Amino acid sequence: MTRNIEFGTFSNSEESQQLLALLCQCFNSPPSDDQYYANLIGLDNFRVIRKDGRVAGGLAILHMGQWFGGSSVPIAGIASVGIAPEHRGTGVAAAMMTELVKQLYEAGVPISTLYASTSTLYRKVGYEQSGNYCRLSVPVDSILLKDRTLPIFPVAATQDEVFHELYRQRAIASSGNLDRNQAIWKGIIESKEETIHAYLIGAEDKPQGYVIFSQKWGDKGYNLLIRDMVAITPAAARRLWTFFADHRSLAENVIWRGMAIDPFLGLLSEQTYKITALERWLVRVINVPKALSLRGYPAGVEAELHLEIQDNILADNNGKFILTVSGGRGEVTKGGRGELRLDVRGLSPLFTGLFTPHQLQTIGQIEATADAIAAATQIFAGSEPWMSDHF
């Protein structure tokens, strides 16, 4: 980095207060939020960039995991990226993200995931759109299911351990769901402004699902704002829809975060739902061999893929690699024929499965032989990568 720019942890408590105040300004959040957010994330997980010895911006790192192919891959989730207005457009943000990528590599992090207010900055340092965050809505009075076979009963949302195993079962079978840390769980079960309700579905000793939600008045009634929900059986899914329908006397809409192509919607009698927002999260493969070897792969696939990667920031990611997949696991070795060529940005949506190899070839993100395309299609086959969490 240049001599007048430094990136790292806080050097004193005054710097932490300066950054927290700056982030409140950047995101137009009330000053009362800064200490709550600091306690939630932990000051050790913030990074600050200084220009000429003064705080010019910073970010937070959330250490957790993300599920791909039935395996949890450790990630660095990047949140609260903010630069002081007087330093925007000067290269400070790009310098900060470049140094972050290097430090994450040195720390042994396989991949990094974030939400972007603008993709341009993050693409410069190797991040690429890699999965969906989708908000959906359906009018309560259009839900016609009446299946009360399973019991549903209220529980304290703050006793969140009861939800963890149910969520984990759903996450393992999905692609892109977070292996949540406690900060993410707290963001779901706690609120300073809203009353949070939570219910379990099924027998108390063996629940089959849950829902955590709040209620907020809309134009004609209140909306059910789903903070998190899981149904691991068809009966639980039907009971959940019935539970929502039973609010029809006053409730207007159910609003939740799910898949863009959500099988949960197949239980509705009519297509009365709407996708009200669709956003893509971005991934940066930090360590190519480590990321590819920690990810899970489809059972029964026996294949070999010869990759050639280009990375303009991390030299160790450059070159040819052989990915050998067997028994749902991957092994990576140096060398090979380089039959599928791409830069590290193009690797991200291939890794997560957002786009097929053929689709990536169509938009110019990879060059490959027909055999390499066929092998990659087998290896990275899976469902839509998505998550219901935003950070």
Image: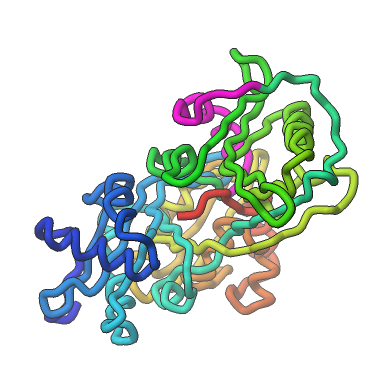
Q: Position of residue 324 (x, y in %)?
A: 54, 50
Q: Residue at x 48, y 63 (%)?
A: 115
Residue 165 sits inside the magenta stretch: yes
Front in this rendered view, residue 133 or 191: 191
Q: Is residue 23 left or right of residue 54?
A: right
Q: Position of residue 240 (x, y in %)?
A: 72, 33
Q: Position of residue 38 (x, y in %)?
A: 28, 51
* Residue sitting farthest toward the top: 205
Quarter location, residue 362: bottom right
Q: Residue at x 76, y 29 (%)?
A: 239
Front in this rendered view, residue 181 or 108: 181
Q: Could you tell me which quadrant the N terminus lies in? A: bottom left
Query: Over which residues does the magenta segment extend?
Result: 153-175
Quarter location, residue 205: top right
Q: Residue at x 64, y 43 (%)?
A: 298
Rendered view: 67 above or below 107: above
Front in this rendered view, residue 202 or 8: 202
Q: Is residue 377 left or right of residue 38?
A: right
Is residue 252 visible to us here?
Answer: yes
Front in this rendered view, residue 76 or 56: 56
Q: Could you tell me which quadrant the C terminus lies in? A: bottom left
Q: Is residue 269 left or right of residue 353?
A: right
Q: Position of residue 215 (x, y in %)?
A: 61, 43
